[in-house]
Amino acid sequence: MKNLKISILLITILLSLFSISLLAQKSSMVTGRVVDEKGEPLPGVNIKIKNQANVTISDNDGKFGLVVTGSSDILVFSYIGYTAVEMKADRSKPMVVVMKEEPKTLNEVMVIGYQDIKKRDLTGSVAKANIEEMLKVPVASFDQALAGRVAGVNVSSSEGIPGGTMNIVIRGKNSLTQENTPLYVIDGFPVEDPTIGSSINPNDIESIDILKDASATAIYGARGANGVIIISTKKGKVGDLTINYDGNSGVQRVTRKIPMMDAYEFVRLQTEIWTSADMTGPNGYLPTINGKTYTLDDYRNIEQYNWQDMIFQDALQQSHNLSLTGGTAGNRYNASFSYFDQDGVVINSNYNKIQGRLGTNIRRNKLNINLAINYSKTTQFGSSPSQSSYSGMNNLFYSVWGYRPVTQPSVPLSTLLDNPTDESVDRLNDYRFNPIMSLKNEYNKRTTEYNQFNGFIEREFIKGLKLKISGGYTIDGRRGEVFNNSKTRYGATISNDKVNATFWTSKRNTWLNENILTYQTNFNKKHFINAMVGLTMQESNYEYYSMKTIYIPNESLGMAGMSQGTPNNLVSSRSEWSMISYLGRFNYNYLSKYYATVSFRADGSSKFVADNRFGYFPSFSLAWNFTEENFMRPLKSILNSGKLRASWGLTGNNRVGEYDTYAQLMILKATQGDYSSSTGITHGVYPFNNNVSNAGAVPYSLPNKDLKWESTGQTNIGIDLSFLEDKINITLDWYNKITSNLLLQATLVPSSGYGSAMKNIGKVENQGIEFTINTTNVKNKNFTWTTDFNISFNYNKVLGLSENQTAMLTNGYFDQNFTSPNYIAKLHYPMGMMYGYIYEGTYKLDEFDFDGTNYTLKSGIPHYTAENNTQPGYPKYADLNGDGVVDSNDQTFIGRGDPLHIGGFSNTFIYKNFDLSIFFQWSYGNDILNANRLIFETGYNKRKDLNQYASFINRWTFENPNSNIPRVSTSSSNLLFSTRIIEDGSYLRLKTLSIGYSISAKLLNKVKINKARISLSGQNLFTITNYSGYDPEVSIRNSALTPGLDFSSYPRAKSVNMGVNLSF
Amino acid sequence: MKKIKIISILSVLVFLSVSCSDFLDKEPYTLTPETYFNNETELETFLTGVYSPLMQEFFYGNYYPLYNAGGDDLTFYQRSSPATSILCANANSSNTYLNTFWKILYEGINRANILLENVDNNTNISQATRDRIRGEALFLRAFYYFHLVEGWGDVPFRLKSTKSVYGLDAERTPKQIIYDQIIKDITTAIPYLYTSANIPYTGRVTQSAAKGILARIYLFRAGENNRDSEVGNPLTNTSDSILAYYRHAKQWALEVKESGLHGLVNPYKQVFIDMCQDKYNSTGIRESIWEVEEAGNRSTTEQAAGRIGNTLGFGSTNDYSTVPAYQNLTGMANPGYSYKFAYASLKLYEMYESEGDTARGDWSIANYEYTYDTNAPKAVTGRKYYYGKLPAGLTSVEGYPCTEEAASTSNKNKTRCAAKYRRELEVVTPKNKNYTPINFPILRYSDILLMIAEADNEINASPTELAYDCLDEVRNRAHITPLKGSNLTKDQFREVIKKERAMEFCFEATRRWDLIRWGDFYKNMINMQGYVTKDAWSNNYKYAANYYQVSPAYNYYPIPDIETSVNKKITKNNPGW
């Protein structure tokens, strides 16, 4: 509590300082104009008299006026991105000052955590994302445009749902069962939750810096092991008020549909499933009615439904950003407002966001004060079609694909559309539900409101010594509302709960205080020293409440009528954690030739106890600007800069529950976890005397006082090269990360009475190479062409698992009938490998003895163990151990979940007022476990009236005996995980294409507009892949152990947008 | 001046860090064992958790009686593709039903251990209450261990709760050591427990239940040599100890009999009707000594309902649970859905036929099917009894007409489902498709009687009057010929007991264990193949032959691989696994 008070106190001080105003002075004038090399005016240039306090800035036309005291005064012109100019003040005539653009890359300011540093002086591996390029397409949050932009950063989404959170993994996955998402630092505020990305308006982002190696991340200590993404938002810019509007609107369409059987093929399939008596009976597909005998051919070109066409829509998307900024050198401000709205390509799904931001910056002498407020509210309608249920049959696309295109002559076709369920479906075993009706009636809304207050006060005490005290407070409030009326899957009369409603709410409040002291000096202009020490404190508390009522009598009231139902489920929980950290960094450089950096952080966390409470995270790095050496001088005209870097450091991952060190008791009423879970704890209900609600307290978890941080030791060696005056820039990094004391939800000996516990056990290695090249191919007055290319390779290896375990099997869950393990993490192999049988095609006729009626498998040919009557056309799997039967011992690796390499390739062209950028992004070498095909390419146990993929047309039949697609049968071997359903998930995608035209300044001046650009952009315009599902960028219920699983995933959209950007 | 500034800055930092001494201590917002066990309610609530494993789906709530204990000569799995299980003779060490059963038993043991360690934390709670709770926990721990020994033989043996995540490996303790502790614990517990007269419901363990289970344990222990010789294990009983075990079994069972608290209900089926109808010994005669309680229909969060009657049992093949007009009806109007996984073997059918036992035979094996109209939702229109099974004079039930199959369909008699647990009797509405409130019997008084008879015959090398009396009490209730005075030899009497127990306790998860302790398991199972080619079976249930092709290894369960993959102190599985 005390600390909270301190923070309040600090904020109060900040606010009072805010009101201090500035005084102005007067004397004789010098005037002039600042222009760039092209002669265009440069507004906002900072102009000061050397060794004096007088400061001014150039106006929108580049003009300035400044009072000088003597004729020998030197004026210093400085402007970000331009080389500073010093000029003698000339009062005789208006001065013309030409400023040259700096060689961009080396002077880029990198934000490395608690400090900024020029790229030239960097010793670690830090990459800057090109936010300007990323924003050439409208996106809801920056992470949606990050894929392929930065080497070593793997960004993917689980599926194509609007507003879906991106999975970002930096330099491979460290943790088997815990989160692998990086730490986000937004204006200095560290946040572990990846959904934070959506709270920031991408247009408000000034820069995104990604800390990759340990020398960079170790300053974030116990939270740095997964890499750090530092987001800095725009601050107010000195100058007249500038108003900027950026608007986009466009349309999205699903990238592909899956070909399904048409009416003819569907009925042909039914003839193999139905008995012929039923088929030709009055309720069959081939009846005789009024003397007409229906044949298969009657189903050609008949009226039929295509359910995918009905469920998908051309969806609109729009975004509007309005921002303003301005101020003086002493007092700057900025504000922005944005609105984003995106309909999903699946009907009744939508994502929208309202966001606003206010910021102000005050500088007075040696004081620098900054305050910012950010508010965002995101609203998501519609639920994920892939992860809502224990039974995969409840997932949306089971019904979309499975619903039949046609009915028997005795059943009007329209009944399919009009009724909630298909009357011919066996409802006991098949949960198909009219997908159109259900989707249109489902109400599922989630909102996230995110408030962030940030401020700092910085004061320089003596030259080079600065103290920065910052404080921040965030409120992350979420709520969800679900209402299932009688026309929805979960609320219909056939459902267990009938009309039902759920409401939940959660809130996380976090505050942060940071106190950073930095000192910068040099000795003899040879030894440069920059040191920083700091103390930070953070505390967070969380609460969650939810309630559900069922059997709601009056559905017309919607959520308002929730209280009329029968209370069903109440959940409440609270938790809190706190952290205190001490940190320091020491940078030394000798003549900008030799660099050394040492950093250190000690993190104390409430999540751990006793001796393990504090974790210590050091790092060391060296760099050598070898082109500064004399012997390199001759090459300087070609290789203008070259730097070798080496670093080692230790970082941590603390993603465990707040109370994992404690033994916990719970009043458990229902089984925890999935049906398949063998590690969950059995509930405690025992209904003495038929008392249904008599639930017992059960030991839920074991204490583990020894629990501590997961620690990752990372070595990085890198080289940065710039050729031909920065026309070619190359960065190459090699790294090796070993994560030990893995926080693992480790399997315990079941006879202990517990299934699993969080333990520090196991070890994982990631090793990789990253290569980035940026080139300026052409640059002249009218035409500029630049190319960026990056590629990264990561190889992940499990080095240790839970005590005595050599492999950890996992079930990537999608349906209760498919719970056998399909993923494996095995010692000395990558985690997330797919696991199952090797498919060898179907059993062919010549493998059988035929006695005229029955086919009997020839002796010596292996068969699936659970099957005693293997028939021709059944799937055949490799008998790897040669014991004559195919059984669980014949399972092996069948695919890899993670890619061999990923990358991006972009080209931008500027010709006069036109600009064009083309960005490709790829992933290579990863496989996808296409579980859809277990159901939609097997006939699914001869399930009646279940439509199938068109690929199943070519199945094995006696007429098509060479096919390797299994025949229609009830063979349980159809449902095994095998290489049959593993597909190459590699892809190359034209991620963005944008064309813009900037209207010339002359025209604009007449309408008082500074800048105007119109653009046309496209996203996901095409994807080259062999994957047969909706999209190869898929990983439902994504986790480190189960990457690349596809079942009923939300399809991806391509979009085309028109945009306009105006600046007043 | 500069120095002052620097000092002031540093002092601010120091001040901030000093104030943080307790900043990192966060007490959890959840219950912890350290702060629990303060009062009687908390002890009772924890005890509920110790009981809870019994009602789980992986124990008596569904899978154990069906898949794990169902692998006997009276039951077969009526599906065209087998469920991987002991029942279908295709189990392995990764079998879900076995693995989870193992896990649940040890969860129960650990819960009991925690309770036993903390029951005396607050001595202000009355000694009697603490003792009774201690007694129930001791008994349950012993009962769970007995299930482990019965299934797996030598197993890890833990009498202290697990307190750390480290060092959990444990070797297999010889079963005789575990038996000794089981017997000691139950003997200790008995005086602490309620008597059956004290509590109106049967879901809680009582003195009678503990004594009867103790008798059962002694009988099983007496038969250990039989199964060990089948699988080639070294024998662990001496002939003296075996005789002693029979004596103890008889003594404990007699104590129940002589308590006068229990008797047999007439008709036989009433005891199961009560279980289906959420009643406890409704006739006032306490035949059911101990049942596993299941309740409700899972319409609330609490998962108190099991699946007895739904998987193992009898109901309709039409689901009315999702039809609003039907779901709240009971009786034949909505007979509840049943998968009817368990069917009676021809051997069991013939046992009843040979004795003319209709009281038990026509209840244990379905004696009718429902008839339905042809329109959705295919409402029940009546009962069609199998040939010869229509009770004389019965024309209707609940207003629904009863008819009889024609003689030409008499073969259907031989392919019928287990019907001890009948969903049409359920009273909880709406009736769920899968979840039922039907209780499962663990110990009935007829078992007490037959245990006395069996043990007595073994002790005295021939049946005494007591043995005949006990046997005939059971037979008389079933309306079959009493055997008193028939001068049976010891061996003949034992065979009679074996058959009697089959007819009395089929589908009650005891037959498999009886066969094993008698040393009959392998022999009986292999002999079942004779039935598979017989009569109607040869056409319809040819595949059932596979289920009976067990190896002697099935005398034991395989130690689950979830245990052996992490517990490196277990190096050897049971013979044949």
Image (tube, coloured by chain):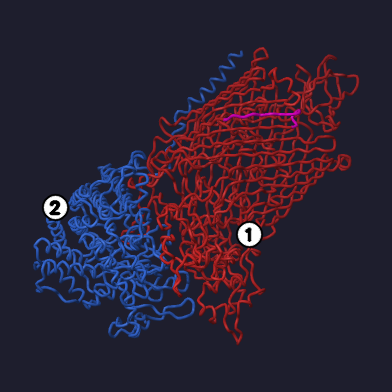
Chain colours: A red, B blue
- Relative side of A625 to A242, left or right: left
Q: Using the image, name the chain to which the residue with label 1 belongs.
A: A
- Relative side of B479 to A1048, left or right: left
Residue under pointer 1? A348
Residue under pointer 2? B238
Say if A889 sits above or below A941 in the image. Answer: above
Q: Amino acid at mark 1?
A: Asn
Query: In the rendering, at what x and y percent does residue B448 appear?
Result: 18, 63
Say if B222 sits above or below B506 in the image. Answer: above
Comparing B503 with A472, the one in front is: B503
**Over which residues does the magenta segment extend?**
A716-727
> Which labelled disc corresponds to residue B516?
none
Query: In the rendering, at what x and y percent does residue A887 appear?
Result: 42, 56
Residue located 11% across and 53% down the image = B240
Looking at the rendering, in which quadrant would you find the C terminus of chain A? top right
- Determine if the magenta segment contains residue A726: yes
- Relative side of A325 to A578, left or right: right
Query: In the rendering, at what x and y percent does residue A206 appear?
Result: 69, 36
Comparing B337 with A483, the one in front is: B337
